[in-house]
Image: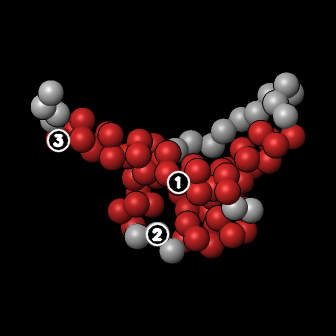
Amino acid sequence: MKTTDTEEIKMYKILIVSIFSLFVVSCNSSTAIQEARKLDPATKAAFCDTARAILWSKDDTFETKKQIKEHNAVFKAICRK
């Protein structure tokens, strides 16, 4: 199957967000923010183009809420200037 440039860009962005999300979950917020700020501008732009702040529900576990807060802290630090 041949992909178009737009499809390849979309897949690249999804890959970046997936990898970045794993990175964020494995770190505490301050470390994740420091590391995210070191990323090259193109990677930051791809993350900011596809990532959004996440909301949690009352049914989410403590660990899930912690991970969401870490993601949102990184999102805010690199995407909202």
3D distance between C-alphas at marks 3 and 1: 22 Å
Residue 74 image point, x, y percent: 63, 58
Q: Which quadrant is the N terminus positioned in?
A: top left
Residue 76 visible here: no
Q: Which quadrant is the C terminus positioned in?
A: bottom right
Q: Mark 1 points at which residue?
A: 20
Residue 33 image point, x, y percent: 64, 66
First of labels 2, 3 by sequence position: 3
For the residue labelled by badge 2, is the local secondary structure a helix, a strand or a loop? loop
First of labels 2, 1 by sequence position: 1
Assess disc 3: are there few (<14), some (14-19) or many (≥20) residues with their C-alpha within 10 Å of its C-alpha.
few
Residue at 73% in and 47% down = 67
Q: Residue furthest left?
A: 2
Residue 41 image point, x, y percent: 39, 67
Residue at 72% in and 44% down = 68
Eye-nearest disc, 2 or 1: 1
Image: 48 above or below 55:
below
Image: 13 above or below 81:
above
Assess disc 1: are there few (<14), some (14-19) or many (≥20) residues with their C-alpha within 10 Å of its C-alpha.
many
The amino acid sitting under disc 3 is Asp
Residue at 69% in and 61% down = 27
3D distance between C-alphas at marks 2 and 1: 10 Å
Q: Name the residue under label 3.
A: 5
3D distance between C-alphas at marks 2 and 3: 23 Å
For the residue labelled by badge 1, is the local secondary structure a helix, a strand or a loop? helix
Residue 42 image point, x, y percent: 35, 62
Assess disc 2: are there few (<14), some (14-19) or many (≥20) residues with their C-alpha within 10 Å of its C-alpha.
few
The amino acid sitting under disc 2 is Leu
Q: Is residue 19 left or right of residue 72?
A: left
The amino acid sitting under disc 1 is Phe
Q: Mark 2 points at which residue?
A: 39
- Dots 2 and 1: beta carbons under 8 Å? no
